[in-house]
Image (cartoon, rainbow, N blue to C red):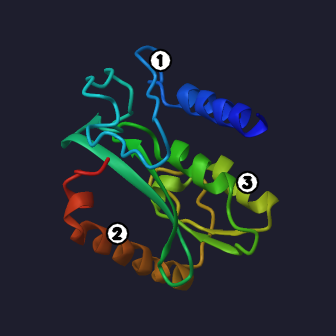
Amino acid sequence: MESHREAQNQRVFRTLHLRRPDGAGRPFEASDDRCNTSESTPDRGLPAQKGAFPRHIGRTKGGLNSKLHAVCDSQGRPVRLHLTAGQVSDFKGADVLLANLPEETQEILGDRGYDSNKIRQSLADRNITACIPPKKNRKSKPPYDWHLYKKRHLIENMFAKLKDWRRVATRYDR
């Protein structure tokens, strides 16, 4: 008797979790665990809602584009990646990535797009050295270690390797 009740509870659990996300439609009930599920699409052939998945493509001077922000380790291997639309400021991408840096981070290398007092101050509060060259139009230009900044070619090489992968370069996988 007890095993029959457990089997009913498992069937109810399976039924509740195999409905469409909006809860509509008939629930799928397998007769037993050995039953193969349908080979069709997971959404049962329904079209996706407009705007359901952000495309992160935005209007820029060069047309429709997107930006990929990255945090890399000392050898140029990506640790975290963040995709934003083309018109979004670099500061918003930096805020997301710099919020959860690994504990052992001592130095940050960034290009001129990440030069802001807010970013520099947040890094200084966590005792992280910011090696970011100042923007050309900045009134007070903070110093940066030019020799350390030369290591930024490792990050550029990482982006070049990513672009070698056709799916990333042509945005088949968003």
Residue 4: tell me if it is visible.
yes
Left or right, 50 with reference to 155: left
Mark 2: amino acid: Phe
Whether pointer 2 and pointer 3 mark residues with C-beta atoms closer than 8 Å, the reply is no
Which residue corresponds to mark 1? Answer: 22
In this orientation, which residue lies closer to the viewer: 111 or 56? 56
In this orientation, which residue lies closer to the viewer: 23 or 28? 28
Using the image, tell me which numbered label, if any, was put on residue 121. Answer: 3
Residue at disc 2, secondary structure: helix
Which residue corresponds to mark 2? Answer: 159
The answer for how far apart the CA atoms under marks 2 and 3 are is: 27 Å
At 76% from the left edge and 34% from the top edge, which residue is drawn? 1
Q: Residue farthest to the top?
A: 24
Left or right, 132 with reference to 56: right
At 22% from the left edge and 51% from the top edge, which residue is drawn? 172
In this orientation, which residue lies closer to the viewer: 78 or 131? 78
Q: Residue farthest to the front?
A: 1
Q: Position of residue 145 (x, y in %)?
A: 59, 78
At 42% from the left edge and 43% from the top edge, which residue is drawn? 84
Residue at disc 3, secondary structure: helix
| Of marks 2 and 3, the one in the foreground | 2
